[in-house]
């Protein structure tokens, strides 16, 4: 079968490898000048910056792609395990080094609040159950309502009606520890106080599989997947933006795509790794969309966006770990600003990425490579980023300088930033959302846009906006679902 995949993010590349390995002829078309999607890689003044996802969990999902093609992943990319996974910092100066060493975790919990040791142990047992029942669902399609009914009893048993924060808080009392064990939905665009407790399994996922880093950055992982895809016969075309998915009037099936250049490329199936909302709203005529009308798409809850400053320093800050999670003083209020009020808060929670802590080759000798990521409201809010971007950048850098990185502004030698407008205009995300749809209970599994379109039977979706959701494990799992569905079509 001749298949076209729109977008070369990790989901698109994984789908391309799987489908090509099954014997289909796959072409990936990419809008930008090189592959990666959210995982686009920037080079600037001798520094290498990963554009987006940098936290690799469940590396076996990646290794499976190479095994399918009778290759060894170690011949293409080197993954190294990190310790700590994250260093979580709080406004009172306390620090929690989060890793998979149970004894170390227990000792740190005891130092924070001795009364929470038993609570954490009970939380672990509950998270084990969520993990054992929830993990298999990541590679199971939910395109029929009976699929949802089959797992409904397990979902009730797992308290999926609770939020991650609500699930954690019934076991943990210390407010800082509650944040340590419930912040993970933020990494996939979710509100810890609203995302279904199924995402509590991320803690167990990390404890079992670890947190890993690709030497050379996530860009090196993208390059490895592109190399594998092309070696087994796949075709990647960059600078090839899709203008329309062409639907046959008689069969209501996709028959190819029209590029911005007005070239028509025929296909027997189309896979979109683009933003689901953008795909439906902009690439498919409304007359072919009974389920996902413009009104339906716009009524969904779309995820937050991000403001990210990439910068290089001419000195190293060895006091900072590879992954730093920096919590603000008004955590719950910040979540309300981000998700409900869609207001740019005076507070922030930050993710600071320092890949040169593990791989110094990403920066010139004696230098450090960074990005600081701040969750911000999507473009449904009233922030004018053409005005606010520079002041917000200054606030972030000044905060880091005052709290953790002395004289930072004097040592920055190169920088760049992206904001919600980048997600909207460059990455084609509706409302500039960074993670497509928000991962709430009523936007999960069967309630999420399906991996095969409800309107067009040979249009498939991979990536953050479909099941199982955002994050590297999620988007790679979506590729397995799609390859299985295409195989049965």
Image (tube, rainbow, N blue to C red):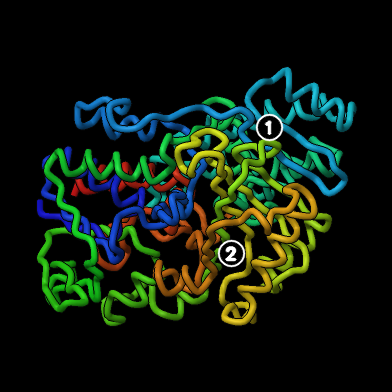
Looking at the rendered structure, the secondary structure element under dot 1 is strand
Q: Nearer the viewer, residue 291 or 345?
A: 345
Q: Nearer the viewer, residue 407 or 346?
A: 407
Across and down, in percent, residue 232 comes to 14, 39
Instruction: Answer with the quarter of the image where residue 138 lies.
Output: top left
Classed neighbour count for the residue bearing mark 1: other residues with Cα under 10 Å, few (<14), some (14–19), many (≥20): some
Image position of 486 (left or right of 397): left
Across and down, in percent, residue 434 comes to 51, 62
Q: Residue furthest top?
A: 103
Q: Are marks 1 and 2 in contact (CB under 8 Å)?
A: no
Image position of 424 (left or right of 173): left
Q: Which residue corresponds to the image point at 34% horizontal and 32% vertical from the top-left?
A: 77
Q: Nearer the viewer, residue 397 or 438?
A: 397
Cα separation, mark 1 vs mark 2, equals 25 Å
- 13 to 213, vertically: above or below: below
Across and down, in percent, residue 156 comes to 62, 43
Residue 170 shows in this picture: no
Across and down, in percent, residue 32 comes to 30, 64
Instruction: Answer with the quarter of the image where residue 474 lies.
Output: top left
Looking at the rendered structure, the secondary structure element under dot 2 is strand
Q: Which residue corresponds to the image point at 79% horizontal and 35% vertical from the top-left?
A: 171
Circle 1 residue: 98
Q: Tag on residue 307?
A: 2
Image position of 408 (left or right of 418): right
Q: Tag on residue 386?
A: none
Mark earlier in primary sequence (1, 2): 1
Instruction: Answer with the quarter of the image where residue 211 lies.
Output: top right
Mark 1, mark 2: which one is toward the viewer? 2
Residue 72 shows in this picture: yes
């Amino acid at each position: 079968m001749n298949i076209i995949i729109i977008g070369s993010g990790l989901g698109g590349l994984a789908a391309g490898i799987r489908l090509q390995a099954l014997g289909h002829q796959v072409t990936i078309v990419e809008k930008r000048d090189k592959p990666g999607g959210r995982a686009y890689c920037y080079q600037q003044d001798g520094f290498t910056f990963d554009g987006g996802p940098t936290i690799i969990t469940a590396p076996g999902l990646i290794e499976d792609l190479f095994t399918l093609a009778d290759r060894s992943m170690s011949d293409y990319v080197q993954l190294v395990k990190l310790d700590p996974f994250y260093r979580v910092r709080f406004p009172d100066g306390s620090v929690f080094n989060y890793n998979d060493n149970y004894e170390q975790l227990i000792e740190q919990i005891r130092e924070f609040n001795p009364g929470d040791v038993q609570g954490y142990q009970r939380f672990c047992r509950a998270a084990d159950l969520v993990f054992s029942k929830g993990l298999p669902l990541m590679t199971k399609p939910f395109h029929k309502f009976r699929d949802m009914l089959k797992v409904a009893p397990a979902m009730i048993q797992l308290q999926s009606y609770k939020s991650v924060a609500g699930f954690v808080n019934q076991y943990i009392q210390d407010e800082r520890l509650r944040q340590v064990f419930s912040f993970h939905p933020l990494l996939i665009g979710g509100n810890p106080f609203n995302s279904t407790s199924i995402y509590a399994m991320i803690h167990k996922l990390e404890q079992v599989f670890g947190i890993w880093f690709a030497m050379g950055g996530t860009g090196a992982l993208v390059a490895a997947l592109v190399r594998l895809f092309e070696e087994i016969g796949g075709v990647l075309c960059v600078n090839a933006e899709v203008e329309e998915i062409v639907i046959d009037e008689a069969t209501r099936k996709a028959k190819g795509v029209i590029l911005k250049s007005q070239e028509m490329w025929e296909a027997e199936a189309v896979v979109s790794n683009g933003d689901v909302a953008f795909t439906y709203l902009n690439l498919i005529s409304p007359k072919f969309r009974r389920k996902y009308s413009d009104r339906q798409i716009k009524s969904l809850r779309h995820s937050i966006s991000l403001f990210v400053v990439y910068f290089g320093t001419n000195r190293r800050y060895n006091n900072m770990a590879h992954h730093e999670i920096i919590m603000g003083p008004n955590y719950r209020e910040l979540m309300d600003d981000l998700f409900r009020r869609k207001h740019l808060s005076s507070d922030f929670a930050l993710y600071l990425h320092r890949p040169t802590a593990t791989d110094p080759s990403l920066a010139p000798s004696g230098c450090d490579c960074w990005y600081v990521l701040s969750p911000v409201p999507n473009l449904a809010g009233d922030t004018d980023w053409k005005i606010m971007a520079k002041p917000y950048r200054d606030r972030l850098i000044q905060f880091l300088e005052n709290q953790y990185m002395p004289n930072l502004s004097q040592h920055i030698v190169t920088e760049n930033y992206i904001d919600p407008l980048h997600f909207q205009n460059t990455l084609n995300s509706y409302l500039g959302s960074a993670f497509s749809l928000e991962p709430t209970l009523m936007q999960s599994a069967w309630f999420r846009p399906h991996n095969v379109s409800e309107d067009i039977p040979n249009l498939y979706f991979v990536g953050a906006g479909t099941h199982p959701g955002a994050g590297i494990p999620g988007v790679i799992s979506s590729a397995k679902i799609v390859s299985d569905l295409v195989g049965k079509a």
